[in-house]
Image: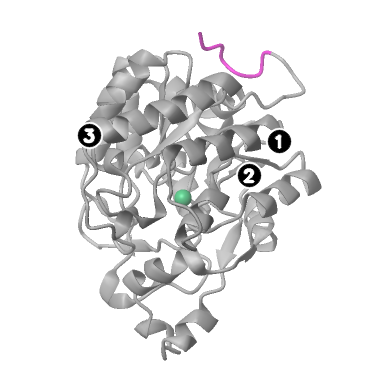
């Protein structure tokens, strides 16, 4: 049975990196020898290709009606845009300042938040993107710069991004969590490790929806970032949790808080991110997303939609609440047209 009236996966990567040839250059040909750390180093330089055939297969398999396409780590806005144009009823896309990052990596310019925001402004002015993401724009050299970005400095960068989002009336996404394989450096995304920082932006920009990518859980089984994300979502009307890598009990943890509830949750899986599901028999949770570094990188298309929908299916809540989590909230927040009115519980 289909789990909801209209199902939107709000966190999807429809592109895949062609890593094999780059690994061969490093003298690595066997997948087990390919390490996440090496992959994260070469990823910004890799070519991304359209992986929509596999995505469309999974969408049909699991009755997923629509996806929000996210660029990340070298994935292109152009490929996502072409997919939106080809399948307007199946895809919408958010954008990231990729050209600024590429030019900075090539040594042509110094990365600045102003240049990134100008590119975002131009991308959003086309009217073809419904928001910003994945995560907030950041310097591509942030992982290896040898400098630690301060709190105030980063917050001032984020304010400039919020100004662009406000101008175009679109949601932003703030990354939280770690897949545990690819290292997420503090200075790359300081807010990733400090969800509480969003309290200030939520107050200063009450008109801009803030969505936590992964709602604090991208990999592993530590719940500290989830707890912080829930706290912030509970404190502000404009803060939302994307939940696709939550196991069932984490949904309940958010749902039990009356200031969060089903109207604040958006289902989204990180489809295409190559994070395997780890099975830990006898532990609780027994399964969760996690890259295990000693196993090397995962080479098949991980079935995260299947795993995630199984977690959601265990929720004993009203179908109307389920419909908000699985699609209704995304329709509202991303302003995606739906052919019928009154199909989703109204949310103020
Ligand atoms: Zn992602």
What segment carries the magenta color? 342-348
Q: Residues within 10 Å of mark 2 (few under 14, many from 20)?
A: many
**Residue designated by label 2:** 64
Which structural element holds mark 3? helix
Q: Is 277 situated above or below 93?
A: below
Q: Is residue 231 left or right of residue 314?
A: left
Does the CB distance between marks 1 and 2 fall below 8 Å? no
Observer-nearest of 307 and 81: 81
Query: Could you say where residue 35 lies in the image, as x and y percent from the top left?
Result: 34, 76
Q: Residue at (42%, 13%) from the top-left corner?
A: 206
**Residue designated by label 3:** 151
Observer-nearest of 141 and 191: 141
Q: Residue at (56%, 29%) from the top-left corner?
A: 330
Observer-nearest of 241 and 79: 79
Evaluate whether residue 28 shows in this view: yes
Q: Residues within 10 Å of mark 1 (few under 14, many from 20)?
A: some
């Amino acid at each position: 049975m289909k789990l909801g009236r209209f199902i939107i996966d709000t966190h999807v990567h429809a592109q895949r990196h062609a890593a094999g040839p780059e690994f061969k250059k490093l003298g690595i040909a066997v997948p087990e020898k390919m390490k996440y750390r090496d992959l994260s180093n070469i990823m910004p330089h890799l070519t991304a290709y359209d992986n929509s055939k596999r995505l469309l297969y999974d969408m049909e398999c699991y009755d997923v009606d629509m996806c929000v396409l996210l660029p990340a780590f070298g994935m292109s806005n152009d490929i996502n845009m072409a997919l939106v144009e080809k399948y307007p009823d199946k895809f919408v896309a958010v954008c990231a300042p990729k050209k600024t990052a590429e030019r900075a990596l090539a040594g042509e310019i110094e990365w600045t938040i102003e240049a990134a925001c100008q590119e975002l402004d131009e991308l959003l002015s086309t009217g073809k993107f419904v928001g910003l993401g994945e995560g907030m724009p950041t310097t591509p050299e942030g992982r290896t710069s040898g400098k630690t970005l301060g709190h105030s400095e980063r917050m001032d960068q984020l304010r400039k991004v919020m100004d662009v989002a406000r101008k175009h009336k679109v949601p932003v996404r703030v990354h939280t969590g770690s897949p545990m394989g690819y290292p997420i450096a503090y200075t790359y995304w300081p807010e990733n490790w400090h969800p509480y920082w969003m309290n200030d932006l939520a107050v200063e920009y009450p008109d801009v929806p803030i969505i936590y990518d992964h709602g604090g859980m991208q990999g592993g089984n530590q719940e500290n970032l989830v707890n912080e994300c829930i706290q912030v979502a509970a404190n502000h009307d404009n803060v939302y949790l994307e939940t696709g890598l939550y196991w069932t009990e984490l949904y309940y943890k958010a749902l039990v808080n009356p200031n969060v509830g089903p109207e604040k949750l958006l289902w989204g899986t990180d489809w295409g991110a190559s994070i395997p599901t780890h099975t830990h028999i006898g532990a609780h949770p027994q399964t969760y997303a996690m890259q295990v570094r000693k196993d090397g990188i995962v080479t098949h298309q991980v079935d995260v939609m299947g795993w995630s929908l199984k977690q959601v299916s265990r929720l004993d809540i009203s179908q109307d609440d389920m419909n908000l989590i699985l699609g209704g909230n995304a329709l509202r927040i991303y302003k995606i047209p739906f052919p019928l009115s009154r199909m989703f519980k109204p949310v103020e």
